[in-house]
Image (cartoon, rainbow, N blue to C red):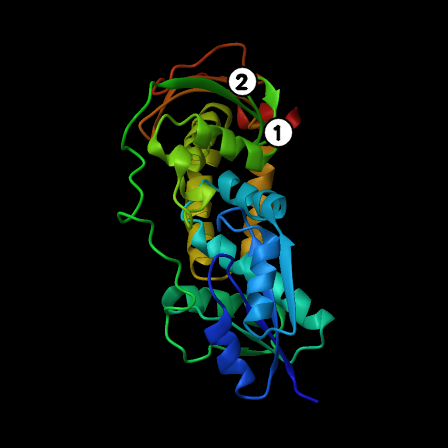
Amino acid sequence: MSERVVLAHRGGLDPAPLIGALTAGGARVVTVAVDLGDSGEDPATTRARALAGGAVEAVVVDARDEFADRYCLPALRANALRPVAALTRSLFAEHLVRVARRHGATAVAHGRTGADRARFEAAVNALAPDLDVIAPPVGPTPTARPEPPGGAPDWTAEPRDPEELVVTFDRGRPVAVDGETMTVRQAVQELNLRSGARGVRRPKGVHAYQAPGAAALVTAHRELEDLTLEPDLADFKRQVERRWAALVHGGQWFSPLRRALDGFIDNTQLHVSGEVRLVLHGGRTVVTGRRGEESPFDSTPGCAPPRRLPSKIAAT
């Protein structure tokens, strides 16, 4: 009986060349596509495309909320939500390994190159060192994400009128926009829609977390931290953020150090609650006001707000 290989398949792209390269070696191919809402293709079409290309089974995972809550929220708390590519590779690897276990596969395969390949393979090796990792030699074309028409998206083109809004955070998590309760994913989408830039109609292949909404959330979160964290804690957290970002960028999402740094970062968020008032225009974000939940004043960005003693904060 032929061995099974689980192949990473990105929606909107034709996996047939990769499937053909694997089946030529006698493998039975199961494809896995992880839906993050950025392919512009419905799951049924993605699955049908893989089966038509020669896969014996095609799995499509709706991971939009999982990606937002388990990957993007920690990145936001670390003020490192962008670039998003390093986060998606770890998520893809996690689901690929899960399907490989379920189908008794001996290997996983992908068509990534360069830094993308290194991140993806590092994640697979951390999760399942017993699985072989295959990169079929069919060239980058079948799996390279197509560039949007006209080149890279220009979020500053065709600006609309400025949008003013208020983002509410609870312990470092965005929970509402203008008083309307939202999930992390919904908050990013809402800020994209109201960014006043062409990014609201982002081309296929451009992820929501590469749009202005994600940058606006990071800006708002950092400003609220500046208001609610003690100076020494804030300074040290910036050092931790740089190390956290370097680990994730290098494909070490599943490393013990990243998990340990998450523990520290999560602890810093205990008092990062409050509201941040933003003006969004042309893909840019300007903070015009901020209020910590435990502070009765509205602080103007750039002014040093009064801070409580670290021991007093720790005692509350």
Q: Earlier in the sequence, mark 2 or mark 1?
A: 2
Compared with 308, 72 (above or below) is below
Q: Please tell me which residue is depicted at 60% across the width and 61% down the height of the picture.
A: 47
Q: Quadrant of the N terminus?
A: bottom right
Provide residue 250's location: percent of width, then percent of height.
43, 61
Specify whether 303 is left or right of 296. Answer: left
Circle 1: element type: helix
Determine contact: label 2, label 1, CB under 8 Å: no
Q: Is residue 61 above or below residue 171?
A: below
Depth check, front residue: 292 or 85: 85
Q: Residue at x 31, y 43 (%)?
A: 153
Amino acid at the residue labelled 1: Ala
Q: Name the spot of residue 94 as percent of width and height, x first.
A: 61, 62
Report whether residue 212 is seen: no
Secondary-structure class at tag 2 = loop
The residue beneath circle 1 is: 314
Which image quarter: residue 113? bottom left
- The residue that disc 2 covers is 178
In the rendered image, the vertical position of residue 29 relative to residue 299, given as above or below? below
| Place of residue 124 in the rendered image (x, y in percent of width and height, measured from the top left) | 56, 69
Residue shown at 59%/25% (left/top)? 313
- Which residue lies at the image location 65% right of the left edge and 62% below the top edge? 59
Q: Is residue 1 visible?
A: yes
- The amino acid type of the residue labelled 2 equals Asp
